[in-house]
Image (cartoon, rainbow, N blue to C red):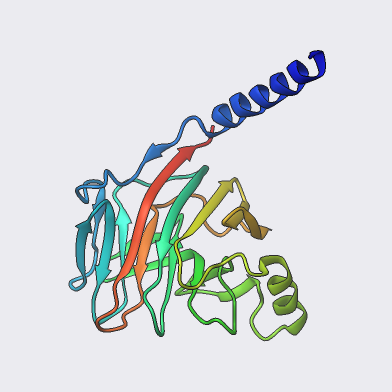
Amino acid sequence: MKRRLLILAALLGSVSFSAFAEDGFVPLFDGKTMTGWTNPYEWGNIEVVNGEIHLTGEKKFFVVTDKSYTDFIFEGDILLPEGKANSGFMFRAHVEPNKVFGYQAEVDGDANRKWSGGLYDEGRRKWFISPIKGDKASEDAFRARAGDAFKRNDWNTYRITCKGNKLKIEINGVTTTDVEDGMDASGPIAIQHHGEKGATYKFRNLRIKELK
């Protein structure tokens, strides 16, 4: 009996710690409206459907948060459309009329390349670190880290942690990128439609916890 009580106490302690660890997150999307978000492009369609953000369009565009974030843990779910598709979660981004650039957690629809969870520098250095495009050792090491964490035809949960110059990307609990880079210290979060005509990119459960 004593052993059972000890096991139960350990389990309860684990649950309470997990709940405490997840405390402090706030939603970035209320499930009903796009309050707190802006489309800086002259094109792109946005709909809220059953608690999801649906993006459609004929050219690439991003939808960005009105608020900028410095150190944080961000989480969000994405479902890619069938066929040719590519997307990403921008963070510490830069926003101009009809342009968003900077750090992007890659969402790769190419089942052969498998670079989901990589760190892409949109509009600047491109594949500069995780992986380094054209560097076979770097590409192989990235695929070994990421494995089959990304599920091509299902919802995938991304978790992005930024603390100073430390940047970490996880997919469904698997760490795919863990690097240091000091290019950007702050900026908004953004979600992407890659521009495939007739394709719908879906997002849900967007939330963030700011770190002190």
Identify the residue at image location x=64%, y=82%: 133
Identify the residue at image location x=37%, y=59%: 190
Residue positioned most to the right = 3
Q: Nearer the viewer, residue 87 or 121?
A: 87
Is 30 drawn above or below residue 1 in the view shown? below
Report the quarter where the C terminus lies.
top right
Question: Position of 151 compared to 31: left or right?
Answer: right
Q: Nearer the viewer, residue 172 or 175?
A: 172
Question: Position of 153 compared to 98: left or right?
Answer: right
Is 111 drawn above or below residue 41 in the view shown? below
Residue positioned most to the front = 1
Q: Nearer the viewer, residue 205 or 180?
A: 205
Residue 33: image location, x then y, percent: 19, 49
Is 71 drawn above or below residue 174 in the view shown? above
Is 31 drawn above or below residue 108 in the view shown? above
Q: Nearer the viewer, residue 62 or 55?
A: 55
Q: Is residue 147 visible?
A: yes
Residue 192: image location, x then y, percent: 36, 67
Q: Residue 50's image quarter?
A: bottom left
Identify the residue at image location x=50%, y=73%: 152
